[in-house]
Amino acid sequence: MTVAPHRRSAVVDLGSNSVRLVVFDGISRNPIPIFNEKSVLRLGRGLNATGRLNEEGVGMAMEVMDRFHAIARGMEADPFEILATAAVRDATNGPEFVAALRARMPGVPIRILSGEEEADYSATGVLCGLPEAEGLVADIGGGSLELIRLSGGQKMDACTLRLGVIRLNDRSGGDLQKARSIADADIAQVGWLDAMRGRPLYLVGGAFRALARLQIARTNYPLNIVHLYTLGEDDAREMTDWIAGSSRRALERLPGAPRKRLEDVPFAATVLRRLMRRVQPSSLVFCVDGLREGWYMRRVAASVGGIDPQEAVAQEMCSRLGRSVTLPDRLMHWTAPLFPDEAQIDRRLRRAACLMSDIGSYDHPEYRAEQTYLRVLRMQGVGFDHPARAFVALTLAIRYEAELGQDFLHPSRQLLTDAQFRRAVVLGLALRLAYTVCGGTEELLDGTGIEITDQELALHLTAGRTAVRGESVRRRLDRLGGMLSLPARIVEGGAA
């Protein structure tokens, strides 16, 4: 929910492998990046042997940082900060490098994060999209691996290991067998990991994201979005074996392969496999939000941190693209009789669907269903995992009269269980009926209601609302009844 839409903030993540500038727009529970650029510097290459930042990378960094400084200032970003991580804090020439940056960018805060601070920001980034996350966060960079235990939405333990992909490559001499032994030895030193067995493992960092991109391409997964992409333990184990055992040429042939990361992915896969061996996670959840989003939520958007991220996205889309910000509450009440035993997670999704149920109102009617479906499926929304996207997208496509056999609905068929798919269709048909009854106006929805029994589905119309009945209402009521395997009728008079 944007409070100050014209304010901008910017952060530079100066890592061991790459440097990235992100400019955020406004103060929002759903961080909105309006500029995002990365440059691969590999500052940490050779650090394990020399103790110094890579000289070639240092020279490139000066040029890149001049560009980032100009962009951030040109976009009037305030605050604008630079966060340096493992390579800079560990290198003997790190202070000299930072002093040179300060001379080129006077007045710009440059912070060398400790491992604890880096872990804090990464954990906050994960909590940005998953405020109730319970489990282990693993944030891999070029120089280090941060491990953070989350419980009750709070960071409980954290540590930093020298298992970043560049450093592990250096420490092992490029030998994956040695890398496995090194990773096992380092991970074994973290005693509190025993308490993480059987919990979700949240993966942050570019090298882990590269693993997800390769797996998405390899399996023809229906949604090319890494954020909250989830794998079960068996699939994750098979993925790490496949990546570690594949040649670079084989990986390059995959569509959208992250070519600049292919040197790193065998080591990322090795670290992940050894970590999985220790904690035996229930699932793997890839998170795009990490250090940069954690900085944003703490430094810029702390005032909205308590808002449900899913609710914030749905509310924002309702106010920006819909015709009414108050009708969705009526629709929640109106559709409730169809779902008497819904779990809390299902109620949240129904509310999101009701909030976004009118976002296609200004689209061309011939493309409204498909456009709305794709808009929701591919939206920038940190609080929606892939099944949630597929559920709300399907619901709204049905609300806009999509037919179940249409090809564009294929992702929902793959991402939802049969029960979830049916529920989305029922809710979509109910919303279609509600909008037909009221034409998008609260006044006409008042005095109407639906009721479901073992024998029938009834649409109740009070005496003052009988004028809304008609062939289109009758037809859509019958369609909803058919999906519920119930006869349907209109009941006139009495209380709705």
Image (cartoon, grey):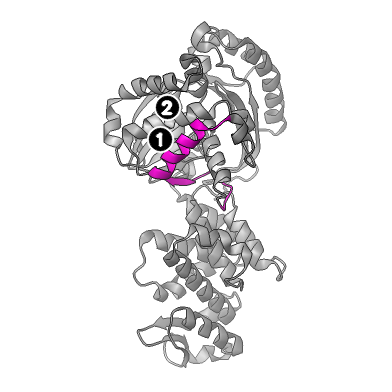
Tag 1–tag 2 contact (CB < 8 Å):
yes
**Residue at 48% of width from left, 19% of height from top?**
175
Q: Find residue 482 and report its horizontal and vertical position in percent.
A: 48, 82
Residue at the image point whose x is 47% and y is 78% from the top: 483
As drawn, 44 above or below 389: above
> Mark 2 highlights which residue?
146
Q: Is residue 22 visible?
A: no
Quadrant of the rendered image containing residue 151: top left
Identify the magenta region.
Answer: 222-247
x and y percent of residue 136 in the render?
Answer: 37, 36
Q: Is residue 59 left or right of residue 242?
A: right
Q: Closer to the camera, 420 or 27?
A: 420
Instruction: Return the mark for residue 20.
Output: none
Q: Residue at x 56, y 44 (%)?
A: 218
Amino acid found under the numbered disc labelled 1: Val
Instruction: Classify 324 as above or below 384.
Output: below
Percent of width and height locating residue 408:
62, 62
Q: CA distance from mark 1 to mark 2?
A: 8 Å
Q: Could you tell me which quadrant the C terminus lies in?
A: bottom left
